[in-house]
């Protein structure tokens, strides 16, 4: 569970701003201070302050991992925000009976942040690829409709389109519904994707 004081970090991350400037505003924890906080962090006498300092003072490591994994599909801000979530989870899950050394702690942070960001980028890339495939199929459907209309001057049925394209009827119906919905909602993303395909 994220403490009330740790919310100040997540609240700050939710505000539009330059991520590098945000991180620069938190002192970087190194050496003895980091070792001290890792050892006293579970102690009830210091409350939540050590956990808060660990999160704020380790944001630089999250930024390093996020910068190394920047992609064309996700901005640095999104990657950093996801990575900071992993950092907060690690800090609040530290085992009071087995304190980590600074090197072990930073290694765990980098690994967890890297894994989370890699998964996020992979999901985004897969979604983008699926959008492009869907748009390409929509283009084929438009072309098939136009071709069949030339023969009979009547809008072809889903069954006729499926036979013409060698697709399952369900795929044709699904694409038609999706295209109709996108048109009715003036889906800008769909229009952009179709524009990319037409210009390629």
Image (tube, rainbow, N blue to C red):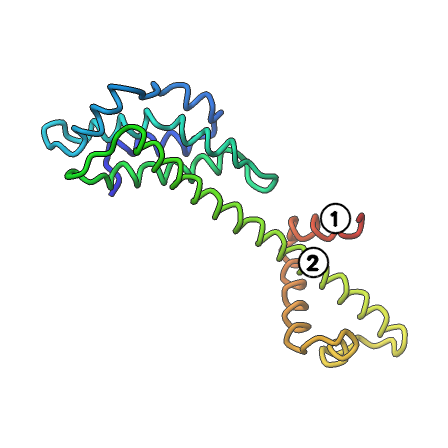
Which of these two is toward me, 79 or 192? 79
57, 164: nearer the viewer: 57
Helix, strand or loop at label 1? It is helix
Q: Residue at x 33, y 30 (%)?
A: 9
Determine which residue is flagged by label 2: 135
Label 2 and label 1: CA atoms lie apart by 10 Å
Mark 2 surroundings: few (<14), some (14-19) or many (≥20) residues within 10 A: many
The residue under the point 24% across, 19% down is: 32
Residue at 40% from the left image edge and 35% from the top image edge:
110
**Which corner quadrant of the image does residue 101 belong to?**
top left
**Image quarter hosting the N terminus:** top left
Q: Residue at x 32, y 26 (%)?
A: 56
Residue denoted by label 1: 196
Tag 1: Cα neighbours inside 10 Å, few (<14), some, or many (≥20)? few
* Number of numbered labels in the structure image: 2
Numbered label attached to residue 17: none
User: Eyeballing the image, is 178 above or below 128?
Assistant: below
Task: Provide residue 161's location: percent of width, then percent of height.
Answer: 76, 76
Given residues 29 and 189, the one toward you in this image is: 29
- Residue lying farthest to the left in this orientation: 45
In percent of width and height, residue 132 lies at 67, 55
Residue 134 placed where, x, y %? 66, 60
Instruction: Check if mark 2's residue and mark 1's residue have beta carbons within 8 Å.
Output: yes
**Residue 177 in the image: above or below residue 89:** below
> In the picture, residue 96 is in which quadrant?
top left
Q: Can you give x and y, in whole percent of width and height, for residue 198 in the image?
A: 79, 52
Left or right of 43 on screen, residue 100: right
Is 108 positioned to the left or the right of 128 in the image? left
Residue 20 left/right relative to 171: left
């Amino acid at each position: 569970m994220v403490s009330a004081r740790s919310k100040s970090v997540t609240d700050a991350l939710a505000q539009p701003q330059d991520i590098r400037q945000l991180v620069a505003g938190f002192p970087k924890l190194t050496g003895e201070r980091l070792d001290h906080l890792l050892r006293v962090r579970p102690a009830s006498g210091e409350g939540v302050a050590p956990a808060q300092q660990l999160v704020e003072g380790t944001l630089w490591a999250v930024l390093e991992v996020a910068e190394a994994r920047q992609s064309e599909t996700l901005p640095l801000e999104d990657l950093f925000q996801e990575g900071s979530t992993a950092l907060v989870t690690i800090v609040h899950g530290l085992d009071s009976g087995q304190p980590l050394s600074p090197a072990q702690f930073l290694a765990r942070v980098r690994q967890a942040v890297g894994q989370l960001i890699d998964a996020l980028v992979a999901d985004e890339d897969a979604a983008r690829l699926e959008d492009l495939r869907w748009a390409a199929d929509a283009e084929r459907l438009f072309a098939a409709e136009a071709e069949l209309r030339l023969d009979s001057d009547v809008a072809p049925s889903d069954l006729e389109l499926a036979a013409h394209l060698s697709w399952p009827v369900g795929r044709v119906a699904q694409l038609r519904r999706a295209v109709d919905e996108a048109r009715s909602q003036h889906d800008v993303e769909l229009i952009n994707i179709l524009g990319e395909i037409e210009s390629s």
